Image (cartoon, rainbow, N blue to C red):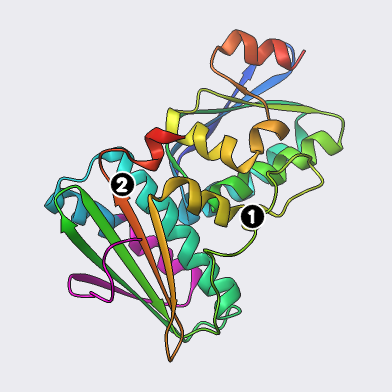
Amino acid sequence: MTGNGNDTTGERLNLRSRMFELTHLHPWIERLALRHRIPANTQFAMNLCLEEAISNIIRHGYSGDPDHSIVIWFTSPREDYFVFVVEDEAPPFNPVELPELPPLNSLEELAIGGQGVRLLRRFADALEYQATPTGNRLSIGFTVTGSAIAKN
Amino acid sequence: MPISTEELEGGITKVILEGRMDIEGAAAVDMRMNVIAGTKKAVIVDLQKVSFLGSMGLRALVAPARAIKGRGGKIVIFGPNELVEKVLKTSGVDTMIPIHHELQNAIAALQ
């Protein structure tokens, strides 16, 4: 459980469904990190997981159509816990239950995109999916202590 | 994202990447990496100064690695930080492009 329920009160970033919009993530996370004293390792995991989640939505959820929106909410339910809620209006897609591809094991396998779910699961501390009436809501949680980064 | 190269003895090329290998960083180095992949046969990718690696950055490493190996060449990664290494290992890229933390070992792996 990410522990945020449907709480989407917090800081928000609106993106269009274009890959270059991903460049807005890093400066936004840096600002949040400064404000909420988020350690560098946790910032790394946040950047990685949001890049994965959002690029999946753009490429697969919206099939590359550039005129849709993606909204990301940031909340900090407690001092050492941070949650990003990513909402889209794409067809239902649940990365939490998606089977993981095996790790790459030869140069013939170039399905790097398929490794995104694996990275998301290894670097996030909590993932929670909800289908919404208009699309999808993915909550990605990070703890500072006992972080997934330290565990693996 | 800065990218530079250094020619070492034995026909080895060291490619030095610096900064964030996110979508922007990957786009910035893609063309240069492809040129290197098409012309060099023994390549060390120096990641000591790479602070972030996402899946876009992984693509920028894997595609050239495939090209180099396809031409009978060799490629290794040198000096990633702990988190960058975790991304490489989680995705399995380390099984395709070996990781070394000592330059001498990286050079030896190419000979």
The residue lying at 81 percent from left, 28 percent from top is B73
Residue A100, numbered circle:
1
Q: Is residue A76 left or right of residue A60?
A: left
Does the magenta segment cover residue B46? no
Pointers 2 and 1 in contact (CB under 8 A)? no
- Of labels 2 and 1, earlier in sequence is 2
**Residue B6, located in which quarter of the rendered image?**
top right
Residue A114 percent coordinates (x, y): 65, 57
State the CA–CA distance, disc 2 to disc 1: 24 Å
Q: Amino acid at mark 1?
A: Glu
Q: Amino acid at mark 2?
A: Gln
The residue lying at 19 percent from left, 47 percent from top is A80
In the picture shown, does residue B51 fall above or below B8? Answer: below
* Span of residues in magenta: A1-26
Chain bearing tag 2 is A
Residue A134 percent coordinates (x, y): 44, 90
Label 2 belongs to which residue? A43
Q: Residues within 10 Å of mark 1 (few under 14, many from 20)?
A: some
**Residue A87 can be seen, yes or no:** yes
Residue A137 percent coordinates (x, y): 40, 76
Q: Is residue B91 left or right of residue A30?
A: right
In the picture shown, does residue A47 fall above or below A57? Answer: above
Q: Front-most of A88 and A110?
A: A88
Chain bearing tag 1 is A
Q: Secondary structure at mark 1?
A: loop
Let me know if marks 2 and 1 both belong to one chain.
yes
Q: Is residue B63 left or right of residue A115?
A: right
